[in-house]
Amino acid sequence: MDRFNNNQFMLNIIDSDIDLISKLSIGIILVGSISLNYSNYQDILKQKFSNNICYQPYFSVINDANAYEFFDNVLKKRSPEKFISDAARKILITYSGGVLRDLINLTQNSIEEAYLNDSDTIQKSHVNAAVEAYGQTKIFGVSNSELQILAKVAKGETFLPRTREYSHLLINQMILEYTYPKKRYAVHPVLLPLISQPLA
C-alpha cells in the first residue's frame, strides 16, 4: 500500500478491511505512502491507530555506517559471490539514496546493462549507465521551478515542504528526508548529475 497516492482510498481500506481484520484479533502492519505523513489525514490515522504509527525516513547510507552495512548485506545475500564488483556495489548503495526499492531497481537495471554488454558480472560501467537512465526517468516531467528548487537544495539551501510544489518533490522521492545524524533533506543522488551538482 506504500504506492497508493490516493490517501482517501487508503483510509477507505482502513475503515473497512483493516477494521474487520482487527476485530478477528489478527495483528496488522500497514505500510502507507509518505504522502500520508504530510497530509490532512495524519490526525485521523493517529486517532485510528492510537498513535501506534512509526514514520520511517530513508536510510542515510552516506552518514550511517549501519545503514550502509544493511544495504551492503542486502546485495551480498541476494547475489552470487563476486557477481557484483565491490566498486559497483558501492555505487549502487550510494545512488540508492537509502531507498531500498531504488537499490533493487538500480541493481535490476545494472543486471540488464551487464547482459546487454555480454558480461557475467556487474561492473561500475553497468551501474553508472543504470544510474543515468534511472535519473532521467525520475526527473521526467519536472517543471522548471521544481528544477530550481532541486538545484537550491543540492547547494545546501533549506528545504521546507510547505507548498504543493515542495511536497510533490518529497512525495515523489526527488527530495529525500533523513533523520540521521539529524533531520535533513537532500536531493535524490540519481538526480544530482542531471542538475550539475557533484555527489557530496
Image (cartoon, grey):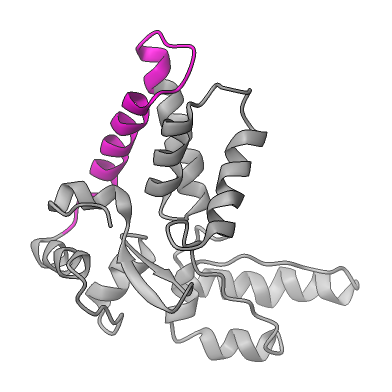
Residue 65 placement (x, y as % from top left): 54, 58
Residue 169 shown in magenta: no
Against 17, residue 130 (above or below) is above
In the picture, measured across the screen, residue 114 lies left or right of residue 189, that is right
Picture mark count? 0
Task: Name the one closer to the observer, 124 or 131.
Answer: 124
Residue 87 placement (x, y as % from top left): 42, 32
Q: Determine the image quadrant of residue 56.
A: bottom right
In the picture, measured across the screen, residue 14 lies left or right of residue 25, that is left
Quadrant containing the N terminus is bottom right
Against 93, residue 195 (above or below) is below
Q: Is residue 140 visible?
A: no
Quadrant containing the C terminus is bottom left
Task: Name the one closer to the observer, 36 or 160.
Answer: 160
Task: Name the one closer to the observer, 114 or 138.
Answer: 114
Q: Determine the image quadrant of residue 30.
A: bottom right
Against 140, residue 154 (above or below) is below
Q: Tell me what residue is drawn at x 67 percent, y 88 percent.
A: 51
Residue 60 placement (x, y as % from top left): 46, 62
In the picture, measured across the screen, residue 162 lies left or right of residue 4, that is left
Q: Which residues are magenta?
A: 113-142
Q: Tell me what residue is drawn at x 73 percent, y 68 percent.
A: 17
Q: Main secondary structure of the magenta part?
A: helix
Q: Tell me what residue is drawn at x 48 percent, y 31 percent.
A: 86
Extreme-right residue of the structure = 25
Q: Tell me what residue is drawn at x 31 percent, y 80 percent.
A: 161
Against 112, residue 68 (above or below) is below
Residue 132 shown in magenta: yes
